[in-house]
Image: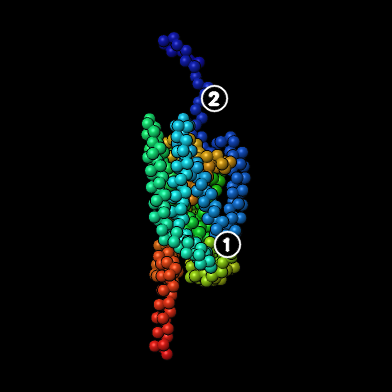
Amino acid sequence: MQSNPSGRVRHRKRPSETDATKANGAQMLVDDQNKYKKMRIRTLSSVWMIGGFVLIIYMGHLYIWAMVVVIQFFMTKELFNLLRKVNEDRQLPGFRILNWFFFFTAMLFTYGRFLSRQLVNTVTSDKLLYRTVSGLIKYQMFICYLLYIIGFVWFILSLKKKLYKYQFGQYAWTHMILLLVFAQSSFTVANIYEGIFWFLLPASLIVINDIAAYFFGFFFGRTPLIKLSPKKTWEGFIGASVATILSAFLLANLMGRFPWLTCPRKDLSTGWLHCDPGPMFKPDYYSLPQWLPFWKDVEILPVQWHALALGLFASIIAPFGGFFASGFKRAFKFKDFGDSIPGHGGITDRMDCQMVMAVFAYIYHQSFIMQQDLSVDMILDQILRSLTYEEQHILYTQLGSVLRERLTIGL
């Protein structure tokens, strides 16, 4: 206690009254008193999710696609609920149904475009079903547009006085959700049918990066990385980047040896696959220096070099999907998108980086891996999508005649 000339008594602040967090503005994860409890809950949830994920991967392409659809459903549900207002919704009893109507229209449009070839190849044994499916695929875009126009008219007719602003806000929010969810996750489904490898490796790298960033930050984190996520640290970011890039190189070698993962699926069946692995999955051998006592040469799959690019993106760029989600949550003042996964939040909280990664993996595969020249599969896909059954039969007959003529000339 000290006195001053004015006669007032000034008390010295006790140490307990000082602000313990003013150095960083927010408490770091490493200083959290409940960090071990949170880590245990988060770890148990992660084990359950990874175990279920491995089981679905084993079951095959169709079940992985079904998993993506379920994830899309719950992500859309979480996002729909973010900006809902109970009082306004009570005055608009059918407005939620309209949102889901747009959801299923978007689903029909997206998967009708991406999986038309697989669907046609699945029903070729039944002539009537084949004609029906071929017709639906041919007019799929028109059907989807017609459904959208029905939803558009439905929305206009549902407008109510004093609720215009809320309704138009929800209409715009619905379209943004569908664009966010379907435009990105549809690339995930395309990756699956190009070969599970192109889905599993990018998804695994995001999981590895997330886990590594958590544990490196948990034990070594001291330096804040970005204000949008106060608990993210440079130590976690750098440690996770190294772990992810190394994992990409090693996992590509492991996964690339299983035809079940590398073969593309041409239909919607669930049987085991066997195919020519292609040049990307055939090993190259490199001689090592003679002074190495244990290894004389090493075999590396060409796809491993491409995996390094995926690992680099997963560790440096994909986390910005999480930062975007963090900024969005801060803007609307809520902690998580949901609470369906203990220790993690909602489904959307786990998928923010995955969606960014899926788009990159698809574009990278189409640009640097997939052969751009015309192939039998590409031409066959165009024939099945563009020609009717009768036209396909005519083409088959004419092609047979051309081949017989060439054979006769050759003899």
Q: Is residue 211 depicted above or below 372 in this figure?
A: above
Characterize the local packing of mark 2: few (<14), some (14-19) or many (20 or more) Cα atoms within 10 angstroms: few
Q: Position of residue 24 (x, y in %)?
A: 47, 35
Question: Can you identify the residue that label 2 sits on?
Answer: 16
User: Is disc 2 placed on a helix, strand or loop?
Assistant: helix
Question: Which residue corresponds to the image point at 41% horizontal and 81% vertical from the top-left?
Answer: 401
Q: Is 259 on the left-hand or right-hand side of 223?
A: right
Quadrant containing the C terminus is: bottom left
**Residue occupying image coordinates x 44% and y 72%:** 393
Q: Residue at x 60, y 45 (%)?
A: 45
What's the mark number on residue 368? none
Residue 58: quarter of image: bottom right
As drawn, the residue found furthest toward the bottom would be: 411
Q: Which numbered disc flags the more N-terminal residue, 2 or 1?
A: 2
Residue type for callout 1: Thr
**Is residue 236 at least partly visible in the picture?**
no
Please tell me which residue lies in front, 254 or 328.
328
Q: Which residue is at a point 41% across and 52% down the rendered structure image?
A: 144
Tell me residue 375's x, y (percent): 42, 71
**Closer to viewer: mark 2 or mark 1:** 1
Q: Which amino acid is tagged 2? A: Ser
